[in-house]
Image (cartoon, helix red, strand yellow):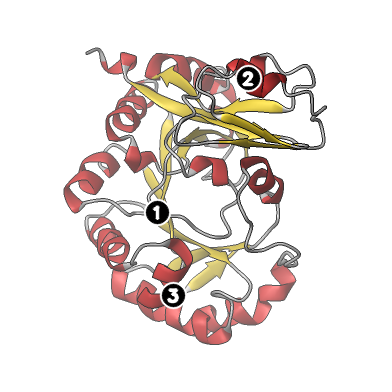
Amino acid sequence: MNPNDQTSIVFNIQKFSLHDGPGIRTVVFLKGCPLKCKWCANPESQSPRIQILWDKEKCLGCGACAASCPQGAVLKTGRIIRINGKTCSGCGICAAGCPAQALRAEGEVKTVREVLNVCLQDRDFYEESGGGVTLSGGEALVHPDFSMALADALQKQNIHVAMETTGFAAPELFDRVTGHMDLLLFDVKHWDEAKHLEGTGVSNRLILDNMKRAIASGMRVLPRLPVIPGYNNTLADAKGFAARLKETGACEIQLLPFHQFGEKKYDELGKPYAYTDVPALHEEDLKDFRQVLLDQGIRAFF
């Protein structure tokens, strides 16, 4: 197969991003993630399949969606619409026929060539700002062949490629895919294994081992920490993160204060949200947290 014909399910291509690597960037979001973080701002990214989301505020309650679904996956109970993820094929017939546009298909099969063409539209911005393209998700490691082919195609155009990753993958696959990247934006969720398992559904052992090996290989790695209220935001946590980072060979970390941007998506997916009414964090809320990291020799920044 021609590498440019590799396909993946993409749920967003965000242009002019300023927070996902150096310079002005285009971020390619791929569906599917091995972690199930309770605070995830993109819950639609967790499933590798195309999903149908329902906006109750737009819904007319007409039931056209349930009547049109060839799989019988759209269930209407009173004014409530639910999508059976086990039987939904993601065909989008229900969304296309909704008179109020209350349903939408999240995710679309795209080739490397199609994504590359979108990314090349902003080439001038990359060159002027020192930017490029960032693969995100979800988790790009879930789509290794697509991610490598897209990175190679971009680099042939002299475009910088970063990958935002959880680092949760078999070492051989992790090394193979990350070897095609110019920069890893490496998310760390918790320094303690039990708490990491509690918040994400997986252990942090493999993640930390992969980070340590990537740094030791000379790869450019930037650890990033989503700081979540009641989960990893105490001063004791800051000290624990500093110790773990030193074990991996890292000397810096970017702090990402918790926000509520993804809350509505949980409702649209019919999923509970663990952080309803939890106030967002701001840089000023994390001054002491950051100072602990600095005192421990870790360059912490926002």
Q: Residue at x 32, y 19 (%)?
A: 6
Residue at the spot of label 3: 195
Q: Earlier in the sequence, mark 2 or mark 1?
A: 2
Image check: 74 left or right of 211? right
Amino acid type of the residue that numbered disc 3 sits on in the rendered structure: Lys
Residue 8: percent from left, percent from top: 39, 26
Instruction: Please identify the quarter of the rendering in which residue 76 is found.
Output: top right
Q: Which residue is mark 2?
A: 94
Residue 258 in sight = yes
Identity, as a three-letter code, of the amino acid under mark 1:
Thr
**Going 25% across and 64% down the picture, which residue do you hit?**
209
Identify which residue is drawn at 21% across, 44% down: 173
Q: CA distance from mark 3 to mark 1?
A: 16 Å
Element under label 1? loop
Q: Earlier in the sequence, mark 3 or mark 1?
A: 1
Mark nearer the N terminus (3 vs 2):
2
* Left or right of residue 31, residue 77 in this image: right
Q: Locate residue 223, reporting x and y percent.
A: 44, 60
Q: Which residue is mark 1?
A: 166
Q: If the image is split into quadrants, where does the C terminus sit?
A: bottom right
